[in-house]
């Protein structure tokens, strides 16, 4: 059967065939992945190698499975906590791993002719965007680039910047239309509107109808905006399956409980979905997990939920159930919208505000369409349906109009090289590393006074690294070499290394330390009582961090290095002694998915320490740590190999 491609897909593939690097900007659900698959298949046909990078590990894992279906022996994955077939023809990795390879193991990329950056607009992510920018700045000259982006207004500026630093043409392919158009509805004051002007007139201009008691939860203050009524309306109008986006983990489960009275499946569908659920739980060793048993009673009615607090394997089960089209309503947080190909007939927004790292605010237009774009199944639906639940106290009519009908936000540089990146650059360029900054997208975008501030920040970081003994006489010291291998947590760990403290730590203490540097407690998380060894480590790291923060503040750095948090210590100590996962859960005030995620991140840190100039004694401890921690639900590779 001959595949029929859309105009923008044909245009992009023609440029790729001609040997050009390409950036594709198109709405969510338009079919950008087809272009990536063309590059991959072209490389397989020619015997060339290709790297595919994704912004989150869940997306990397999904792509690994997808590509393996077509070329099982030629696909590998590297994500820091997973390494399967690392010399494969098609190698999937997180962008951090690619950036690290560019700076530390550049020659290992010689065999790869293409790099695919999925969700390249992630370059303006506040926390991780700098990694994308560094990857693009130092992109090897022999590698061609395919960037896949959501619709952004300054896509040409991004391409022109890449052209300017690499001196080669970048073809830009744009698509503004979705193959399945979206139809917008608004649930406000117990009514549903599909006309914005009527919504404003009837929904926003009746202040007497509002309950102004601020102590009542936001969702309860929306008069008549009943989730049960809305879901019934969707079911009656045959608008299922539905992805219902919620910006709270707990609320996904609360809403699933609210509609548990519905049963969306006939007897045959019920048999199919419970059979599939049970088989997947058996495959992923979830049959004894309490959370899987709790979820099953929803699954058998065609209802599901999905959020970062769940076990990664259980999230994988839910994703596979959704692709089976047997799940009719899924309550989920926004990560379900990121790259993962999970279309539905309808998308619902529980609210139009979310936490952006610096506080709660209205959704960005780009984020709204990233999620709304999941509505409308290509070749199945003539249009997709998007319902937004509106609380006039939380979202003004002006904000609502901007979110839904405004121009998507530009991609703005978040360039802020880590200490480890600075050390790697200093090792290669010495004091000429400041000449790297004019190659950045930040320099390309901003006014002169902001350029001056960016250079001053780099100079301050170099000054700190010299003052703390990472750089001496124009070269990296052993301490500096150690720090250059550990991105994000380099200062506190290199200080302990330099003081000889790592040698004296037991495997348990080294594991606890590695977990403390990565863990970031959510607001309101309670720290449990600590063992005497953990208390000593906490005191030690606090002392080191105070000195680091004092130096950073004196050098006028606004963003101080991350503190160490020991909230997960009791769970880790019990886990390393062989306790079951159910047994460690009551020891800490943290969701099970978070525990797994941070245990894996801690493992990644100890693996990075093993690549530094530490002694054989420390490396032996690290092997023991990995053996004790990397088991059962924490073992990422087991999930993928299964």
Image: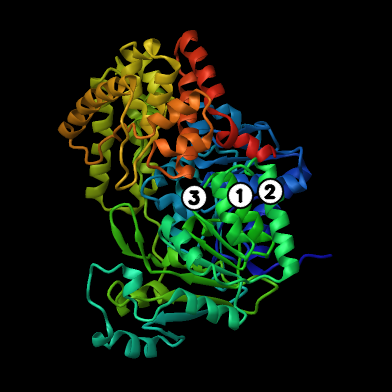
According to the image, label 3 marks what residue? 163
Q: In the image, which is nearer the foreground, mark 2 or mark 1? A: 2
Q: Secondary structure at mark 3?
A: helix
- Tell me, yes or no, if residue 188 can be seen here: yes
Q: Local crowd at mark 2 within 10 Å, few (<14), some, or many (≥20)? A: many
Q: Residue at x 72, y 66 (%)?
A: 269
Report, in whole angstroms, how far the alpha carbon at label 2 lies from the one at label 1: 9 Å
Q: In this rendering, would 116 be left or right of 597? A: right
Q: Residue furthest left?
A: 554
- Which residue carries the number 1 mark? 316
Whether label 2 touches label 1, CB < 8 Å: yes
Q: Which residue is mark 2?
A: 280
**Mark 2 or 3, nearer chain start:** 3
Decide: few, some or many residues near mark 1? Use Cα within 10 Å; few <14, some 14-19, many ≥20.
many
The part of the image, by quadrant, that contains residue 407 is: bottom left
Q: Marks 2/3: CA distance?
A: 47 Å
Q: Is residue 278 above or below residue 410?
A: above
Q: Tell me how far mark 3 sits from mark 1, CA to CA.
A: 39 Å
Q: Position of residue 301 (x, y in %)?
A: 62, 66
* Mark nearer the viewer, 3 or 1: 1
């Amino acid at each position: 059967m001959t595949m029929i491609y859309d105009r923008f897909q044909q245009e992009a593939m023609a440029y790729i065939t001609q040997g050009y690097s390409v950036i594709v900007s198109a709405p969510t659900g338009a079919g950008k992945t087809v272009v990536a698959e063309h590059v991959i298949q072209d490389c397989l046909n020619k015997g060339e190698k290709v790297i595919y990078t994704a912004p989150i590990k869940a997306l990397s894992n999904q792509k690994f499975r997808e590509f393996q279906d077509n070329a099982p022996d030629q696909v590998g994955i590297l994500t820091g906590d997973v390494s399967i077939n690392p010399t494969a023809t098609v190698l999937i990795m997180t962008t951090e791993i690619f950036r690290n390879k560019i700076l530390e193991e550049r020659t290992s990329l010689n065999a790869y002719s293409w790099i695919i950056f999925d969700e390249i607009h992630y370059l303006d992510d506040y926390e991780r965007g700098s990694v994308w920018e560094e990857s693009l700045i130092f992109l090897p000259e022999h590698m061609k680039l395919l960037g896949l982006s959501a619709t952004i207004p300054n896509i040409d500026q991004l391409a022109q910047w890449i052209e300017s630093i690499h001196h080669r043409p970048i073809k830009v392919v744009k698509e503004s239309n979705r193959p399945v158009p979206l139809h917008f509805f608004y649930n406000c004051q117990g009514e549903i509107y599909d006309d914005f002007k009527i919504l404003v007139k009837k929904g926003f201009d009746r202040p007497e109808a509002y309950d102004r008691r601020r102590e009542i939860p936001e969702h309860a203050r929306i008069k008549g905006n009943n989730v049960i009524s809305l879901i019934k309306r969707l079911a009656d109008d045959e608008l299922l399956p539905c992805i219902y986006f919620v910006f709270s983990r707990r609320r996904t489960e609360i809403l699933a409980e609210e509609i548990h009275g519905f049963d969306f499946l006939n007897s045959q569908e019920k048999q199919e979905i419970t059979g599939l659920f049970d088989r997947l739980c058996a495959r992923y060793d979830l049959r004894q997990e309490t959370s899987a048993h709790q979820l099953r009673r929803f699954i058998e009615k065609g209802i599901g939920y999905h959020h970062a607090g769940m076990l990664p394997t259980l999230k994988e089960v839910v994703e596979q159930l959704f692709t089976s089209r047997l799940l009719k309503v899924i309550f989920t947080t926004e990560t379900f919208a990121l790259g993962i190909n999970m279309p539905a007939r309808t998308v619902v927004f529980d609210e139009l505000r979310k936490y952006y790292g610096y506080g709660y605010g209205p959704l960005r237009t780009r984020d709204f369409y990233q999620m709304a774009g999941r509505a409308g199944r290509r070749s199945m639906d003539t249009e997709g349906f998007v319902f937004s639940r509106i609380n006039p106290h939380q979202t003004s009519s002006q904000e609502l109009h901007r979110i839904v009908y405004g121009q998507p936000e530009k991609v703005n540089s978040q360039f802020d090289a880590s200490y480890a990146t600075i050390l790697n650059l200093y090792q290669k360029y010495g004091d000429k590393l400041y000449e790297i900054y004019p190659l950045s997208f930040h320099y390309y975008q901003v006014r002169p006074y902001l350029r001056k501030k960016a250079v001053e920040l780099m100079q301050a970081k170099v000054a700190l690294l010299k003052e703390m003994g990472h750089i001496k006489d124009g070269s990296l010291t052993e301490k500096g070499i150690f720090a250059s291998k550990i991105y994000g947590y380099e200062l506190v760990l290199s200080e302990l290394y330099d003081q000889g403290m790592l040698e004296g730590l037991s495997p348990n203490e080294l594991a606890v330390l590695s977990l403390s540097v990565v863990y970031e407690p959510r607001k309101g998380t309670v720290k449990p009582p600590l063992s005497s060894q953990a208390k000593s480590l906490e005191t030690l790291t606090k002392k080191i961090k105070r000195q680091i923060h004092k130096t950073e503040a004196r050098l006028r750095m606004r963003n101080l290095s991350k503190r160490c948090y020991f909230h997960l210590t009791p769970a880790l100590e019990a886990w390393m002694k062989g306790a079951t996962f159910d047994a460690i859960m009551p020891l800490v005030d943290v969701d099970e998915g978070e525990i797994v995620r941070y245990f894996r991140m801690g493992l990644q840190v100890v693996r990075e320490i093993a690549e530094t100039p530490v002694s054989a004694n420390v490396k032996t401890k690290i092997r023991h740590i990995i053996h004790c921690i990397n088991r059962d639900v924490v073992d990422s590779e087991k999930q993928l190999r299964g």
